[in-house]
Image (cartoon, helix red, strand yellow):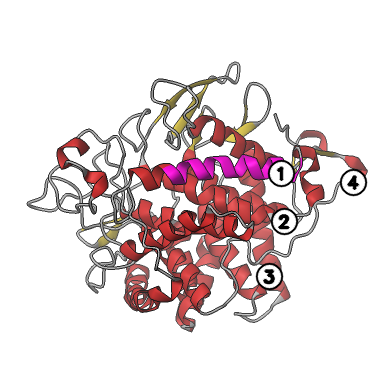
Amino acid sequence: MITLCPDLKPEHFAPQISKLWEASASKILSIDAAETPGAATPVFTIEGKYTARGWTEWTQGFVYGSAILQYDATGDEKFLTMGRDRTRDRMAHHITHIGVHDHGFNNVSTYGNLLRLMVEGRIPDDDGEKAFYELALKCSGAVQAARWTPIAGGGGYIYSFNGPHSLFADTIRSLRALSVSHALGHVLMGEQDLRISLLGRLLDHARATSKYAVYYGEGRDAYDERGRTAHESVFNLNDGNFRCPNSQQGYSPFTTWTRGQSWIMAGYPEQLEWIDTLADSEFEPFGGRSAVEELLLKPALAACDHFIAETPTDGIPYWDTGAPNLHKLGDYRNKPAQIENDFEPVDSSAAAIAAQGLLRLGHYLEGKDDARGEKYWQAGLTVADTVLAEPYLSTDPNHEGLILHSIYHRPNGWDHIPQGSKIPRGESSMWGDYHARELALYLQRLIENKPYYTFFGGVQAVAPQNPQGAERPARSS
């Protein structure tokens, strides 16, 4: 169980954050120098060098988004130039990519961050450039929402790259693409000019994920433990009924792959923050604001509570809470994570993502005068204190990774096992590094009393237009 550090405050992190950005700069430059336009995107490191290995191009937005975050944090213009130029020249195909569930990862990390910087006055205001970013984000959200499978009883979900039968836990974090598109006044156009609400699809997907990917200790099956999460939920396409949980990257359908859990932990709280910016009237077709808040809050609380209880004391989880050899580590929940062991690897990328989710949930609850917020806030700071420091933070200029000891796909054996070790360790991932940078920027902005960092910071919300009353809100059942 994570041992909360009640005295931690954002100001504590200033030296760590400065060290992180110093190390980050050379790594971003090294990756950019080695990248060949049009070649496969860097995904994770092998012996310290980023290499491409994946099912889809889901990490390119993290590559260029990292440069944009580096500029945001340090003001170094060369990283702005790099991030802006690479986004313009190499990211267009991601906007209309109909084959993935990763639009929030790729496009909000790039076009979204650039729009945010412009709205904040951090880069020159240019109407044409701003319209370019807004159009990209509008289209991305609509394309993501079109990847839709209806389910029995109403509603549906954005299906994964595995096919229409497959709902991934990961996708909750990519709902940010729908959020931004909706806030910019966009809708998805269907047959016979049917106007489909992006907010409606977002809430339906969030509902399906909550119901089928998150457990609540309510007797769903023999392994129903509150806060446990399933990576994949499988549906029968003939009748729309749920069939079974599954896992692609975790140990089993009935254990919790911790990075999948961390996407849940980060995705729901940031949507709670976003809906706070919308008018009450937006929620009338979906049962009202209170119903929507409860829909998003229930899975966030459950997943975060489970993570706190199941993770070692320093806040770094092992790659799966049911990994088969965890028992050989003894009372692993009540001591710091062991990077060097002979049985199961830790996953620092899950920690980097989870820390931000805990912080955002804590911040949200404290803003509602909810006393529970303090626990999640301090848990987030505790995890950050570990993952943003050595031995997880890499200051080695010869290693292109920023956060060490990340795991990609343990079942497939894709992660590098160094000589003399029995488990993968010592490597980094593009998502782990990007989310560590997001985490550092989040804390830095609090320290410097700058605008609170959100994915929707560059969006000036406008109400979607509904000519002839043609809007069809998605079902709320």
Query: Is residue 289 inside the magenta stretch?
Result: yes
Residue at label 1? 290
> Residue 301 — which label?
none
Could you classify mark 2 by the number of other residues whose Cα lies within 10 Å: few (under 14), some (14-19), or many (20 or more)? many
Identify which residue is drawn at 44% across, 50% down: 57
Residue at label 4? 467
Q: Residue furthest top?
A: 239
SS assignment at label 4: helix
**Which mark lies nearer to you, 1 or 3?**
1
Identify which residue is drawn at 62% across, 56% down: 273
**Residue 186, image x and y in percent?**
74, 52
Mark 3 or mark 4, earlier in chain: 3
User: In this image, 229 relative to 125: left or right?
Assistant: left
Could you classify mark 1 by the number of other residues whose Cα lies within 10 Å: few (under 14), some (14-19), or many (20 or more)? few
Mark 2 or mark 4, earlier in chain: 2
Amino acid on which the number 3 mark rests in the picture = Lys
Image quadrant of residue 50? Answer: bottom left
Q: Are marks 4 and 1 in contact (CB under 8 Å)?
A: no
Assign the magenta stretch its main secondary structure: helix
Residues 364 and 346: in front is 364
Residue at label 2? 183
User: In this image, 64 relative to 369: left or right?
Assistant: left
Mark 4 or mark 1, earlier in chain: 1
Q: Is residue 451 above or below residue 96?
A: below
Amino acid on which the number 1 mark rests in the picture = Ser
User: In this image, 471 relative to 102: left or right?
Assistant: right
Q: Are marks 3 and 2 in contact (CB under 8 Å)?
A: no
**Residue 32, image x and y in percent?**
37, 69
Span of residues in magenta: 288-305
Q: Is residue 313 above or below residue 255?
A: below
Query: Is residue 462 inside the magenta stretch?
Result: no
Q: CA distance from mark 2 to mark 1?
A: 20 Å
